[in-house]
């Protein structure tokens, strides 16, 4: 699936010959609001038997324009590309935001796209889309410019959740506050944590709760705490109910600089597939509690038992 991910418009144009509808945006999180844009692009491309292609950026443009002040990303560039492809997009262009793009005037945007993608027939964007130097262009002006350049421009309406439009910034804030249920409702799917299993101190085994330690350091960090969800071993596809602690483990060691994900499977795992180096993906369903410091390991063990029992109840329809 990932063989249709390109690292620039130039490389894409060398290999792609189909007429295309281009969905343009940052698409961080590929949430339900983004999917309206993607669905528009797919529908429009079908009218001329072409392809739907997403043009996005591996890093937020603000990282070039205002270094150090850019918003933290919900997902990695390749994770975003994978989600875009899973949403039905035929190809993804991860175009670096550079000096040339930063100086591109709004009225030059469509001619720039047509020059680099000769097969461009249509464009799909969200209602809050901005483009051009100093963000002077908006969705409506893009539609007008499209008419003058022979390009059909479609604008997706915002998706409203709890009386406000779904947005990447709202999802980042909900993550930070541990509101994983709201995050999942805005994403339209379970929030995913993915990383490789690494060796640990095996303390969990000594207190009856063996864990799989996962190295994971996202930009947009969720609240530290305990989550219930489903753990998936990516190679085999085995899916198991689990509890995950995302935190700095204050009870058992000096606080870590980088939080660690510790996953405890609620049913006995096949240890032959959960080896060090295995790729694990956990889908978070519920936030159980914030991370806390306990007086001793016995008290920690008692709380973990409570966490597991609560997780089993919450995940009962998945067990």
Image (spheres, rainbow, N blue to C red):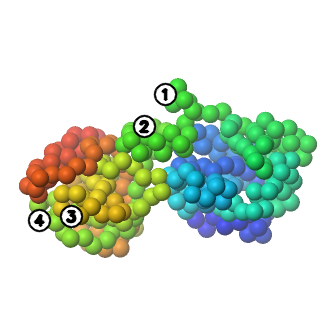
User: What's the distance in space between the residues labelled 1 and 4, CA to CA?
Assistant: 45 Å
Above-or-below relation of 49 to 117? above
User: Does the rendering let one see residue 184?
Assistant: no
Callout 2–callout 3 Cβ contact below 8 Å:
no
**In the picture provided, is 186 more to the left or to the right than 34?**
left
Foreground mark, 4 or 3, reads 3
Callout 2–callout 1 Cβ contact below 8 Å:
yes
User: What's the distance in space between the residues labelled 4 and 3, CA to CA?
Assistant: 15 Å
Mark 4 crowd level (few <14, some 14–19, many ≥20, 10 Å Cα): few
Mark carried by residue 182: 2
Above-or-below relation of 284 to 260? above
Locate residue 88, reporting x and y percent.
60, 51
Mark positioned earlier in the residue sequence (1 or 4): 1
Residue highlighted by disc 1 = 162
Secondary structure, mark 3, is loop
> Would you identify the image quadrant in which residue 142 lies?
top right
Mark positioned earlier in the residue sequence (3 or 1): 1
Q: Nearer the viewer, residue 212 or 13?
A: 212
């Amino acid at each position: 699936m990932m063989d249709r991910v390109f690292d620039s418009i130039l490389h894409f144009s060398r290999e792609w010959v189909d007429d295309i509808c281009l969905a343009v945006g940052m698409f961080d999180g590929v949430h339900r609001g983004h999917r309206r844009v993607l669905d528009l692009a797919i529908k429009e491309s079908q009218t001329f038997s072409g392809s739907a292609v997403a043009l996005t950026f591996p890093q937020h443009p603000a990282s070039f324009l205002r270094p150090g002040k850019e918003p933290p990303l919900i997902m990695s560039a390749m994770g975003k590309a994978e989600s875009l492809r899973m949403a039905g997009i035929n190809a993804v262009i991860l175009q670096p935001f550079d000096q040339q793009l930063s100086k591109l005037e709004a009225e030059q945007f469509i001619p720039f796209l047509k020059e680099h993608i000769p097969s461009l027939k249509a464009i799909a964007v969200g209602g809050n889309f901005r483009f051009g130097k100093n963000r002077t262009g908006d969705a409506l002006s893009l539609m007008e410019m499209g008419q003058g350049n022979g390009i059909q421009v479609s604008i997706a309406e915002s998706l409203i959740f709890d009386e406000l439009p779904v947005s990447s910034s709202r999802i980042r804030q909900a993550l930070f506050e541990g509101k994983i249920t709201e995050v999942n409702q805005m994403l339209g799917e379970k929030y995913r944590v993915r990383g490789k299993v690494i060796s640990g101190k095996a303390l969990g085994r000594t207190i009856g709760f063996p864990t799989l330690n996962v190295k994971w350091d996202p930009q947009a960090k969720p609240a530290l705490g305990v989550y219930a969800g489903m753990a998936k071993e990516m190679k085999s596809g085995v899916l198991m109910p689990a509890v995950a602690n995302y935190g700095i483990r204050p009870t058992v060691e000096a606080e870590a600089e980088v939080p660690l994900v510790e996953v405890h499977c609620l049913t006995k795992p096949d240890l032959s597939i959960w080896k060090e180096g295995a790729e694990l993906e956990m889908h978070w369903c519920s936030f159980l509690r914030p991370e806390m410091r306990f007086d001793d390991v016995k008290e920690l063990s008692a709380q973990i038992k409570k966490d597991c029992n609560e997780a089993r109840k919450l995940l009962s329809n998945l067990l």
